[in-house]
Image (spheres, rainbow, N blue to C red):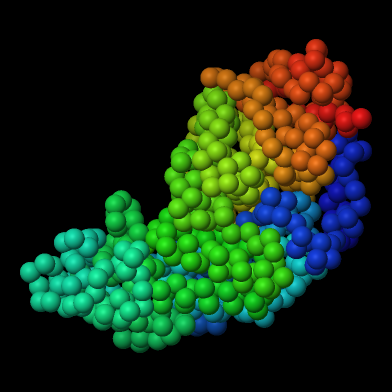
Amino acid sequence: MKVNRVSTALVCPLFACCCLLFCRPMGAWAASIEEFRARKPQDEAIYFVLPDRFANGDPSNDRGGLSGDRLTTGYDPTAKGFFHGGDLRGLIERLDYIQGLGATAVWLGPVFQNKSVQGPPGRESAGYHGYWITDFTHVDAHFGGNSDLHALVDAAHARGLKIYLDIVVNHTADVIQYRECSGHVCPYRSRAQYPYTRRGGILGAPINDAFMGDEAAQQTDENFAKLTRPDYAYTPFVPAGEEHLKVPEWLNDLIVYHNRGNSTFSGESSQMGDFDGLDDLMTENPRVVRGFIEIYGKWIDDFGIDGFRIDTAKHVNAEFWQAFVPAILARAAARGIPNFHLFGEVATGMDPALLAEHTRVDKLPAVLDFAFAAAVRDTVAGNAGTDELARLFDADSLYEGGAATALQLPTFISNHDAGRFAYFVRKSRPQARDPELLARVRLAHAMLFLLRGVPVVYYGDEQGFAGTGGDQDSRQDMFASQVAVYNAEPLVGTRHTTATDSFDTSHPLYAAIAELARLRREQPALREGRQILRSAGKRPGLFAVSRIDPATGRELLVAFNTSPRSLEAQVSVEPGSRRFASLYGDCRRETAATGSYTVRIPALDFIACAADEKP
Ligand SMILES: [Ca+2]
Ligand SMILES: [Ca+2]
Ligand SMILES: [Ca+2]
């Protein structure tokens, strides 16, 4: 905890007025296991990290125990598509940094053993990101091993930090190939044109005679026992030497995959097609459902994991989730983890209806709030009116459980696929100078921490990382990078570059996020409070909401100014809220009249004002 005190000392002078109210001894963060397990999903602030890119605590594992060139080991710290050496030991050594930022949970990009390198000749890249799993029961040797994950979980839990794993059930690494299309992409072959009961199309020989298909009513062991031939669409095979590459062993059976060629991400192929060659599992088969409950249940049993982020959730059938979700929650509860946080990735834009569908039909307890990311991008990086934010939150009623479920949605503004918020600002505003970039990135983080949902900070945003796009361009190194394009990038809020390490607790964004996290931790209204819309408009400018403390009924007004000019306006407040105190920024003490309060907010800034305790 000693480094936490140091970071507080660095942060507080910048936020002196807030610190008078909120800077507490960091010992307050220490929590017994019972105390932190009692925290609900909405009480967390999540830090999302790609272990390969964060900290290298053990150079001896950089090549994952393999020898040879980068096409064997996957290791090339100068190339953005290869392993760079980060590992779980490194993470353990940086927990002070993560906790000093105010995070209470760490979401690790997938840590399971991957196929080190895949891709056609000349276009290979490595499984540094973790989404190409071969062995679902072991931590990738590049990241250390299972014992390092035990050590990380224990070290995190000792500080009251939770650990979330990123899990995949939609696909494995690309191992299975098709005879019909070696060397080129196999287009998707549909169930209607290539039915399970004919070899290679409707004119082919009868196979899988009595198999009744994969629809919900047919998802029984008896029916799937009749599916014995995997060559209805293509002729799948496993290259020599890879017959037993996958763990557990049942994953090496071709019959548990769809084997229908590449997804076009529309229609039936969205769920049954291969994601760019990745072997798409037949998640309709009850054997696959049981297999994954056992695989991921065991990580909970053995490690005491606190939550799962579910990759590519929308590419898996609803019946799978309807069985998997309750089984995993029950497994966690039996392990003494009653508040297991389970949320799916349903990649989309400003489309809360699609997100909500997956809470209603799949029964996912929560989904990553891609609509929030789009709305903040449009309003704070772009020029959309703040009414887009109003539309976003109005749609909370669509979620299973309504607004109460929306409190558990992990919200974010940057990620490893679409890119970082600072990149979106630069893209929308190529002329913007550093102070404006900094102000907009800070304002977006204020929305992330003060509006409803569970904030997810993408590692490196707090150091001003921007990037030049999504995917590999948004996956910079926190340790001294050897990637030329990363090191050429001007960071936000600092003259520093990624050529030397980026764990600067005095970076203005690190300080700002730490302050926002503290505010959220101190105010139950910001974590668990109902959110009432107070003001929004068709142009950039004011967006205001009240959050209501569920225990006391006390009102907390949060107001943002997305325009580059200061503003003054009247907003509605509860009639019983007569006097306010500043939690952040400059709040008027008195209301203008019963139910009317005047806010004054500098350009690209925000205020947080708490009504006096009810008498
Ligand atoms: Ca290493
Ligand atoms: Ca494949
Ligand atoms: Ca699928």
Q: Is residue 421 left or right of residue 611?
A: left
Q: Position of residue 54 (x, y in %)?
A: 64, 61
Q: Residue furthest top?
A: 593
In the displayed structure, would residue 239 be above or below residue 38?
below
Q: Is residue 564 left or right of residue 336?
A: left
Residue at left offset 80%, top offset 67%: 33
In the rendered image, is residue 78 in sight?
no
Of residues 338 and 448, the one drawn nearer to the viewer in this rendering: 338
Q: Position of residue 291 (x, y in %)?
A: 47, 77
Q: Residue furthest left?
A: 203
Residue at left offset 90%, top offset 48%: 24
Q: Quadrant of residue 85?
A: bottom right
Q: Quadrant of residue 575?
A: top right
Tally of marks? 0
In the rendered image, is residue 447 in sight?
yes
Residue at left offset 43%, top offset 85%: 249
Q: Position of residue 299 (x, y in %)?
A: 60, 75
Quadrant location, the C terminus: top right
Quadrant location, the N terminus: bottom right
In the displayed structure, would residue 557 be above or below residue 190?
above
In the displayed structure, would residue 151 be above or below residue 361?
below
Q: Position of residue 30 (x, y in %)?
A: 85, 61
Residue at left offset 15%, top offset 74%: 199
Of residues 346 and 78, the one drawn nearer to the viewer in this rendering: 346
Q: Is residue 348 left or right of residue 484?
A: left
In the displayed structure, would residue 341 be above or below residue 149?
above
Q: Residue furthest front?
A: 217
